[in-house]
Image: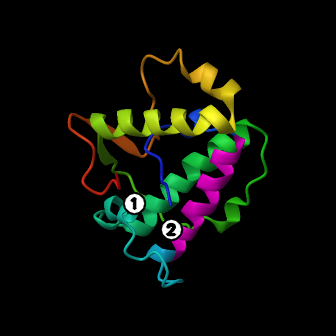
Amino acid sequence: MRLWSIHPHYLDAKGLVALWRETLLAQNVLLGKTVGYKNHPQLNRFKAMKNPEGAIASYLRGIAKEAQARQYHFDTAKINSRRVRSQITVTSGQIAFEFSHLKNKLKTRDPEKLQLLETVTHVDIHPLFEEISGEIESWEIL
């Protein structure tokens, strides 16, 4: 499971679809609808929120917005109705790690998308997150 902190517009088609599916699974975990993955480290930052279900729903809405911009048809009825107003912090080190990780994946999966990312000088993040200074997050599996 990979719940990217970087903005979904950087993901290739396969990556965006995978993110949607994995986040729907994460939502089910946080809603108590499945027992698998309940201790996955990627969920820790959502679990730490006052309203984890609202945080994951807001995250899904960000993915759905990108999908809509690409004219994909993701079933937004699957997103729970809860919402959050606050943001989740993510470190600059985590953002840099994720962007590099994505570029490595794209070397074989989508070289054209990788070429577009090579010109990026500032990495946008998912709107749910707020960037702070710091190293790679403790929940990241290296």
- Relative side of 73 to 110, left or right: right
At which x and y percent is residue 70?
Answer: 74, 37
Q: Nearer the viewer, mark 1 or mark 2?
A: 1
Whether residue 104 is situated above or below residue 141 in the rendered picture: above
In the image, 108 versus 113, the foreground residue is 108
Say what amino acid the circle numbered 1 marks: Gln
Query: In the rendered image, which residue does mark 2 sit on?
Result: 26
Pointers 1 and 2 in contact (C-beta within 8 Å): yes
Q: In what element is the residue under mark 2?
A: helix
In the image, 89 versus 44, the foreground residue is 44
Residue sitting at 69 percent across and 44 percent down? 67
Q: In this picture, which residue range is highlighted in magenta?
A: 13-28
At which x and y percent is residue 42?
Answer: 39, 60
Residue sitting at 35 percent across and 64 percent down? 41
At which x and y percent is residue 141?
Answer: 35, 56
Say what amino acid the circle numbered 2 marks: Ala
Residue 109 seen from this side:
yes
Q: In what element is the residue under mark 1?
A: helix
Whether residue 68 is situated above or below residue 22 in the rendered picture: above
The crowding category of the residue bearing disc 1, from other C-alpha atoms within 10 Å (few below 14, some 14 to 19, many at least 20), is: some
Q: Which mark is residue 134?
A: none
- Relative side of 34 to 141, left or right: right
Q: Write down the quadrant of residue 116 in the picture.
A: top right
Q: Which mark is residue 42?
A: 1
Residue sitting at 30 percent across and 62 percent down? 49
Whether residue 38 is situated above or below residue 100 in the rendered picture: below
